[in-house]
Amino acid sequence: MTHAVRIVREMHRRHPDVSYDVTIKVEHLLRNARHLAALTDIGCLFLTTAVESFDNEVLRRLAKGHTAADFGRALGLFRQHGLAVHPTFIPFHPWTTLVTMGRSANASPATTSSPAWHDWADSAEAAGGVPHLLEPWFCCAEPPAVRLGAPAAALN
């Protein structure tokens, strides 16, 4: 991450009005938390991270390298540094059951001290007005990021 921070610092020095966003794994965010302040200082608008699930068994099966509680810790760091987070989720996978779907609807990181869904849902990316938590990425004719923030007329 230090190499990337050096590159973005130089970009910011040369073009201070340019903003950007980053995509970083939860486990890398926690390991490199010391760089989060630099991101906001040099124009980072938001951070996307693949949370994917709050079910630790699903996270293990997907070999994500983090737990639900890890996302809770990372979320605290984002708030501390003023970074908006755009988490992504895999709402439907081979381990989806009616029980896990119900849990996802009331999702929060799996610790009592972690922020609940409503504490960060305002910064979750929405595609067509529906949070990614409820919309599988493969249902779209175009990647959700293409549609985010664009007026409907601009997409035609």
Image (cartoon, grey):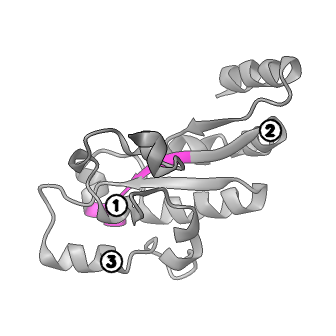
Three-letter code, disc 1: Ser
Q: Mark 1 and mark 2 in contact (Cβ < 8 Å)?
A: no
Identify residue type, mark 2: Ala
Which numbered mark, 3 or 1, is in the foreground of this view?
A: 3
Whether residue 12 sits left or right of residue 123 in the image: it is right
* Residue 122 figure quarter: bottom right
Q: Position of residue 116 (x, y in %)?
A: 52, 78
Let me know if residue 116 appears in the view: no
Q: Earlier in the sequence, mark 3 or mark 2?
A: 2
Looking at the image, is 86 positioned above or below residue 6? below
User: Could you tell which of marks 2 and 1 lies nearer the N-terminus?
Assistant: 2
> Mark number for residue 53?
1
Residue 16, given in percent of the width and then of the height, sits at 86, 28
What's the magenta region? 48-57
Give the residue at mark 2. Answer: 38
For marks 2 and 1, give the CA distance.
28 Å
Q: Which mark is residue 105?
A: 3
Query: Callout 1: helix, strand or loop?
Result: loop
Q: Nearer the viewer, residue 9 or 132?
A: 132
Identity of the residue drawn at 51% across and 59% down: 70
Taking the image as shown, residue 71 lies to the left or right of residue 107, namely right
The residue drawn where x is 86% and y is 17% is 14
